[in-house]
Amino acid sequence: MNATELPSRQQVEDLLYREAALLDEWRLEEWLALLTQDATYQIPPTDVPEGDARNTLFIIADDALRIRSRVKQLLGKSAWAENPHSRTRRMITNVRVLGAEDENIIITANFAVHRMRYESVDTYIGHYDYKLVRQGNELRIRERRAILDNEALRPHGKIGFIL
Amino acid sequence: MEKSNEPFIIDDEAAGLFRVNRRVFTDPECLEQERRRLFDKCWIYAGHESEVPHAGDYRSRNVAGRPLILVRGDDRAIRVLLNTCTHRGALVCRQKSGNARTFQCPYHAWTYDSRGQLVGVPGEDSYSGAFKREEMALGMPPHVESYRGFVFVCFDRTADSLYDYLAGAREYLDLVADQCQLGMKIVAGQQSYSARANWKLLVENSYDGYHGLPTHQRYFTFLADAGIQMKGGNIASQRQRAIDLGNGHAVLEYDSPWGRPIAQWAVTFGEHRKAHFEELRRRFDERFGAERAQRICETSRNLGIFPNLVINDIMAVTVRTFYPVSPDYMEVNAWALAPVDESAEDSALRLDNFLTFLGPGGFATPDDVEMLESCQRGFANREVVWSDISRGMKREHPSITDELQMRAFWRRWNQLMTEPQIRRARKAA
């Protein structure tokens, strides 16, 4: 791959499927290695899915520092919302390589993430908007936005794991 | 079902013991009684004036279990309309928000104006002379009043005014409303979530200083990693108090360990913002004098307004309300409140600070939800009848890690749930 060439859908799918597996297996340190140093992770509110975190109250708007803190917390003992860990299973589909903006490769994909906890199954449905960059021969995640189709986090109650 | 004769609460001032019967968290009959005696009688938060700034702006939402429309009429007055067509019942407003001159029921096209008056009935000549259009306006709660921008409704015709109802809570709403001369606004974006738990567990939790360190250990570790150490390592060692505000309202007030976007700088905000925050603070000193400015800017306040409104002015300001769908499930809505004239940069910092702790993806709220749901599951052990709310009962000045604020709620709750239901005379029209 050179810098001007878009990755194939299969190359992008390889990354997204690997990411999904790492998150489902709670291998969060390895997941962090898929992110750039300046990566962001956002979940807009369900009523303003196209919002901007600078002027809209999001559910999650992590900068790189907070993503790393989140992982540290989740791997520690006192993130009670996920201690014990939920089981999760992610279905990633409809992956599309939309184009490039400067060095960023624009990706979208649909998701259905099931969370199994205390014998309830709650499903988070939506799509991801990614901005990927090339680092050497690897694709890395610079921006990761999970946009929910759910109209409210009901009955989910919370997003304790990494969606 | 076997009828329990046990009291809802045990309030033994002499011994210093306060207990709540766990049946109040699980019993469907108890919830029905709450709907009639609390939610149909008390002042219930419906929204904020800033959510409908222009004539015709509306928000439709569920309040006290009813679909309502908060609307600013063409006369600029704020009204609350019952969202049901007076003809056959359909919702006349099916959008969550927008701007409209009229609400037209999609079923038979009856049309109401922004004041709720019926202005259009297709084929009106088919009705008899007894049918009066002016009697068919959209329903309204008998009382709708605002205090400092917060709009409440009350379904009890004989209720006291909102002003009297709020009692000591007014002082604490003032401390929030005074944060901007031009007014405060609800920021775009509603956090809509839930908990598989009884709604009163969230009342208790929202001003529970005792749970802070064990439940939210990871938040304090996050703060410490960012460079904020608790003074004395412990929130209880700081200047702080818990106050019963009357009518079931209560507040915790304490020196903030964290930065506050209104005008209290912390290391997490960055050195480059220090001078700007000193300037923000100086303006408060000029407006209010040093003492009140210090209170507005540097103290945090967890305020509970009976029965189901929480305004926590902590690392940001959240307005949170919740309503029981069933004894073991509640819906929660939360918003951020901010000065209307806050700069884009300050506002972004405020929202960022909000999300460190608050909301269903924050570093604290998900753990609260987990704890409430955990309590609810524990209640299945019906053999354990009582929860204990006795902390600090014999202290002259209970601390914020005591439970005075919860006892204030429970005493009012118990009074309304048990007082004899005498038919009160309707106020003269």
Image (spheres, rainbow, N blue to C red):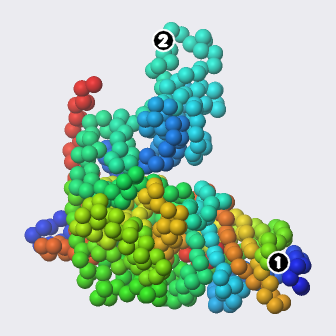
Location of residue B97 in the rendering, given as x and y in whole percent from the top left corner: 57, 45
Q: Which is nearer the eye, A41 or B345?
A: B345
Q: Secondary structure at mark 1?
A: helix
Subunit under mark 1: A
Image quadrant holding the C terminus of chain B, namely top left
Query: In the displayed structure, would residue B224 be above or below residue B285?
Result: below
List the residue tagged with mark 2: B130
Q: Using residue B424 as the reference point, say whether residue B117 is left or right of it.
A: right
Name the residue furthest left. B14
Instruction: Give the quadrant of residue B123.
Output: top right
- Tell me the amino acid under the disc marked 2: Ala
Of B385 and B178, which appears nearest the observer? B178
Provide residue A87's location: percent of width, then percent of height. 62, 79
Residue at point 22%, 35% (across, down) = B424
Measured Cα–Cα span from mark 2 to mark 1: 69 Å
Q: Residue furthest top?
A: B129
Q: Which mark, residue A13?
A: 1
B403 or B282: which is nearer to us?
Answer: B282
Relative side of B207 to A38, left or right: left
Residue under the image location 50 percent in, 70 percent down? B349
